[in-house]
Image (tube, coloured by chain):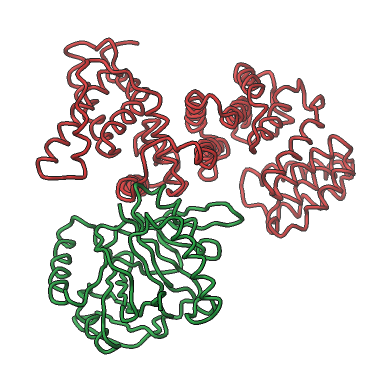
Amino acid sequence: MRHGSTATIDAVYRAEFGRAVATVAALTGDIGLAEDAVQEAFADAVRTWPERGWPTNPGAWITTGARHRALDRLRRESARADKEHGAALLRPPVEEAEVSPVTDDQLRMIFTCCHPALSPPSQVALTLRLVCGLRTAEIARLFLQPEHTVAQRLSRAKAKIRQAGIPLRVPPPHLLADRVPVVLACVYLVFTEGYSATSGQVAVRAELCDEAIRLGRLVCGLLPGESEARALLALMLLQDSRRAQRLSDDEELVPLEDQDRTRWNRPAIAAGLSCLNAATDATGPYLAQARIAAAHASAPSWSETDWHAVLSGYDELLEHIESPVIRVNRAVAVGFAHGFPAGLAALDEVATDPRLAGTHLVSATRADLLRRACRPREAAEHYRAALASVGNEQARRFLTRRLTEVENRIL
Amino acid sequence: MHYLVTLVGREDTPAAQPGTPEFDAEVTRYAEFEEKEGAAVAGGAALFPSAEAIQVRRAGGQTLVTDGPFTEQAEVVGGFYVFEAADLDEAIRLARQLPAVDSDGVEVRPLVEWMPHDTPRADWWMALLWESSAAVVEPGTPEWDTMAAEHARFGEKYADALRGGGALRPPSTATTVRVRDGQLLLTDGPYPEFAEVIDRLYLFAAEGRDRAAEIAAAIPLGDGGRAEVRQIVDLDA
């Protein structure tokens, strides 16, 4: 690590903030207090490190400093007869200069941030803040929300943890099965928000994908026995390996078929596949999705894709999530595995689902299958229908391009 | 920590009408719960339907006392429990065993203070103090202290009649607990069907409706606040 500049203190902040907060919160039982104390310890670092030189273990320096500050404040507050905090003082401060944060503290913090009595947006914001160490302004920027909205959400969530008595702990074994999915859902929410941005001008927000993968790795390290966590990490790595190719230079969405596979991130694919191999006994929805992603990532070309593997991935996924959108995607896989007429028949089965009414998904998929089945006239008709109900500008341009293609074939 | 668990449900079912076999069956299910988890139960009562309630409103410096029913809402508070639990997980574990979570939802909220009560009797009444959720005062603020002082004065004046009660943490601390298909569903925030939230409750004894109305009219209410006074069902009768 380079020493002496604020840029590197930033790096320490990013790497150590979450662990330090977790450790101090475990000691004091108060997340807000821990966060303030760690914040102040970093302020001390900014003042003293450049002058007096860097400590050998910056993380331990921060944690120790934050712990002392937190205990000082508890002492002052208990002098004001704040009995709520008094109990924490019964534990004498440990005097060693270097403490190594315990992974248990961080795991405890993740489960606290993802407690099911908090709303999913609060879980995400809190996890990014307290576990990943993102600042409020950064979280606001990533989710394209006003900073005060995020700030309010964070303070409301922290107040609820404190006042409603949400325990700062890893849930006992009988609750773990209920709670792990919430933690993983939170991590995956961060990823999907980054990978297919629901709002704003950019379709991919790389920082969120990176943050989600970092969290996924952390959770896998903290819960080595959880195959679900590994399956989720595999899924994120495999999807993310294609991130750079999903958009063309002029910011158009590039379908999987047309992506330059030589430029997919090979190390990420290798890591994702090995993660997938270690997760085969997972029973949740991530394994099936990871298998679909793996089938695409390992295919040397679109035409050599193992469509039967993709199809069985969708069948497996439908056992976990009954979604018409998944059925539409499955119909495409049926088309490639068993011929386009079979795909069109599979699409017919889901086309009347009222949940798809008003979207362009069915028309666009039908048009695509018809185009591939060399029925350009019908394809054009359905591209036009899809264009009539599409809302997203990028998708509109893509469908228009396809429509022109099939119209040229008719001529 | 003490948690108030508000049982919310439809009133137009036989199970909500004291005296019906359905009501008795429901009571049996609650008795089974108390048999199992009684150690954690620090209070509770079932209420007569809201049509028989008394309503107290405070607006523009005036106190208005009228009969219920209060609003057109299909769902009303049918009863409550107070649990003594180490943390929210423990309170949720208890709450999810209540029969009400299957058909409706129950709201779990921590109490700032709790005055315990004895076994409710036939002449007991409960006053639920409602506020619009925006008007709720945070414990520890000067406004809270002013309000608390008024309640202390009310408590002294009606000490003979008061049987118990409590003040709640702000609605942001609430969690709604439902069980659907055996799955526990937790939602952040108070029971969403109500625009107002309960921020305090009193239990008191009163010989007759007039006396109950008299005591209720003396309860300190913020401007725009209201108290809903309902008679308690004596389950031992």
In the displayed structure, B8 sits above or below B20; it is above
The answer to whether residue B64 is visible is yes
Q: Quadrant of residue A52?
A: top left
Which percent across, then down, holds residue B225?
A: 27, 74
**Residue A289: percent from left, percent from top:** 67, 35
Task: Report the side of B22 relative to A104 (left or right).
Answer: right
Total number of numbered labels?
0
Question: Which shade is chain A?
Answer: red
Q: Is residue A181 left or right of residue A31?
A: right
Query: How far across and down, in percent of the image, does residue B234 sit?
Result: 38, 77
Is residue A190 in view from this perspective? no
For image coordinates 46% across by 54% down, the residue present is B187
Query: Relative to residue A5, is residue A330 depicted above or below?
Result: below
Residue closest to the eye, A392 or B221: B221
Is residue B86 shown left or right of residue A197?
Answer: left
The quadrant in which residue B45 appears is bottom left
Q: Is residue B123 left or right of residue B24?
A: left
Q: Is residue B98 above or below residue B71?
A: above
Residue displayed at 54% across by 39% down: A177
Q: Residue B3, position in %: x, y?
A: 34, 57
Q: Residue at x 33, y 45 (%)?
A: A158
Instruction: Kindly give the residue lying farthest to the left in the view shown.
Output: A79
Please state, as top left, top right, bottom left or bottom right, where the C terminus of chain B lies in the image: bottom left
Task: Report the residue at 22% width, 35% height from top.
Answer: A88
Q: Is residue B195 above or below residue A19?
A: below
Tell me, what hue is chain B? green
